[in-house]
Image (spheres, helix red, strand yellow):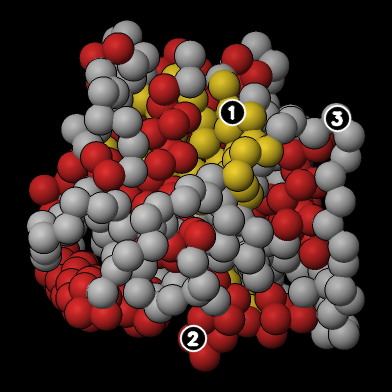
Amino acid sequence: MGNLCAIPAPQTPKKKQTKRLPNAPPISNSSNRWSRSRSSRQEKIDDATIQEQALVAAMLLKHHQQQNGTLPFDRSSSLRQTNASNKKNSLPRSSSSRPRSLTDSLIQPHQLVNQDIRLDDLETNHFVLVHGGGFGAWCWYKTIALLEEGGFKVDAIDLAGSGVDSFDTNNITSISQYVKPLTDFLDKLPEGEKVILVGHDIGGACISYAAELFPLKISKAVFISAAMLISGQSTLDIFSQQVGSNDLLQRSQIFLYSNGKDQPPSSIDLDKSLLRDLLFNHSPAKDVALASVSMRPIPFAPVLEKLSLSDLRYGSVRRFYIVTPEDNAISVTLQENMINANPPEKVFRLKGADHSPFFSKPQALHKLLVEISQIR
């Protein structure tokens, strides 16, 4: 995640102004104006429902860990929003257009996107979701539910040493080893079948690596506040640009040295007391609680490795970037630097989103993913 960078002596953070360069791709604002009617009773119902979902997700995670499972997150385990009330026909307003609330309930996908979407007309209706550093497939539970309810096929991958994958994070020595669950999945796809790869945080480097190996199996690559590298760069090269400007990020890092203090760190953990401020500053409390008991250390070796990305293979994959403006882990300035250095086909701005929009803005994120799937 954006918290992976070398740590110098802590410095006082400097406030930066965000400026877009003139040749950057256009940015779309995702916020929509919905009807503004919602009763306080409905808010309480939605809040209770989301809390129940988070608890169920945690129970599922614990169950998988007890079973020593190593497969990608089972789509059958994804949580679906029950329709708590059908009394009103008016659409609930999007959380992206209202003042911040800890309640950001799931609503039915047909209320978010055009009901006339013909999935058979899309190049692919299959999403593959790749989490960021420290996260696991569990973090996509709202996105999985919304996409599946809309008829899309969804797979969320646990990278090596992440989520319910049993591999020891400290023993991961390369990005190929870290990404192996994803590359194995893509390798087994039937010939001619394509997917939309979605990467968050360090998952951006992972889907870039996969795009170089399997360009013909990837319809589009979507980067959500993610490392979008150019050839010869490592994730550390990107995130080190924030050194000295993000005191919160530096204070949150706990380097682990399983191979001895005289060797490079084997992994990085995060200070649980700083998780909310760093990653979830606009996310519901239930999801922060879920993350605090589910996140695992981040392997360091894949962050150090420089990627070799060719124009012929990686460059042939259509790329899209989703900017998270309220991100305390990967600053907007850094996100825009990556965009300008390696321009994607289109850039979207997810208004009000923190570093974890699958928690803080699930409906708006869902809408963007569906929109990207329809771009021809």
Residue assigned mark 1: 319
Q: Which of 187 and 151 is in front in this view?
A: 151
Residue assigned mark 2: 272
Among numbered discs 2 and 1, the one appearing first in the sequence: 2
| For residue 277, above or below residue 129 | below
Please give the label number shown on residue 178: none
Left or right, 343 with reference to 198: right
Measure the alpha-carbon separation of dots 2 and 3: 39 Å
Residue type (three-letter) at the residue carrying disc 3: Asn
Among numbered discs 2 and 3, the one appearing first in the sequence: 3
Residue assigned mark 3: 23
Measure the alpha-carbon separation of dots 2 and 1: 33 Å
Residue type (three-letter) at the residue carrying disc 1: Arg
The residue located at (76%, 68%) in the rendering is: 6
- SS at badge 2: helix
**Residue 354 percent across, percent down from the top left:** 56, 65
**Residue 323 percent across, percent down from the top left:** 63, 49
- SS at badge 3: loop
Left or right, 200 with reference to 185: right
Q: Quadrant of residue 65?
A: bottom left
Q: Count the labels in the image.
A: 3
Q: Can residue 362 be seen by looking at this rendering?
A: no
